[in-house]
Amino acid sequence: MQHLQIDPTFKLQVQRLHRLSVYGRWLVVGLLWVSIGLLSLWGLRSEIALWRQYFTWVAVQYGLYYNPLPTFGLALCIGMTVSVLVWQSRNILLGLPQQEQQRLEQQVYRIRQQGQSHPLWKRVCQ
C-alpha cells in the first residue's frame, strides 16, 4: 500500500473520506438534537419555566433528578456533541493519528477495489 500513499489522487480521496466522516458525525449530532434533544427539553418544560422564574442550582439538580428520561436524553446529546468537538479539535490541532490515517487509507483502497457498486464510490472516487 506504500505506492498508493504517493499518489496525489489517493490522498485526495482519503481527504474526501475524512470530510465525509466529519459531516456524518455532525449529522448524527444534529439528528440527536432535533429528535432526542427536543423531546428531552419538552419533557423538562415545566422545570425550565420554574428555572426561568427562580433559578438556583438546587432547582436544576432536583428537576434533573426527578426527570431521569429527559435528563438521560440531554446527557446523550451533550455527550455526543462534546465528543465530536473534541475529536474534530484534536484532528485540526494535532492532525490525524497514524492509526486513523491508515484506517481511512484501507477504506479508500476497499472502495476502489469494489468500484462503482460501493455506496461511497461517487463521493470519494469521482
Image (cartoon, grey):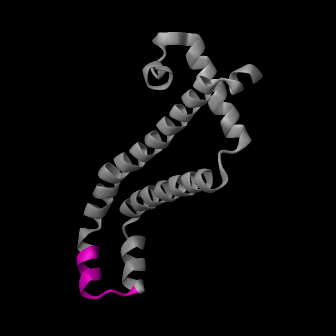
Residue 65 lies in quadrant: bottom left
Q: Residue at x 62, y 26 (%)?
A: 8
Looking at the magenta stretch, what is its main secondary structure? helix
Q: Position of residue 72 (x, y in %)?
A: 43, 59
**Residue 1 visible from this viewpoint:** no
Q: Residue at x 70, y 27 (%)?
A: 5
Left or right of 30 on screen, residue 95: right
In this view, the residue in front, 76 or 67, is 76
Q: For the N terminus, which image quadrant?
A: top right
Q: Residue 54 in magenta?
A: yes
Left or right of 53 on screen, residue 120: right
Q: Which residues are magenta?
A: 47-56
In this view, the residue in front, 72 or 126, is 126
Q: Residue 124 in magenta?
A: no
Q: Position of residue 68 (x, y in %)?
A: 41, 64
Seen in the picture, residue 46 relative to 39 is either above or below; the reply is below
In this view, the residue in front, 5 or 47, is 5
Left or right of 32 on screen, residue 105: right
**Residue 8 visible from this viewpoint:** yes
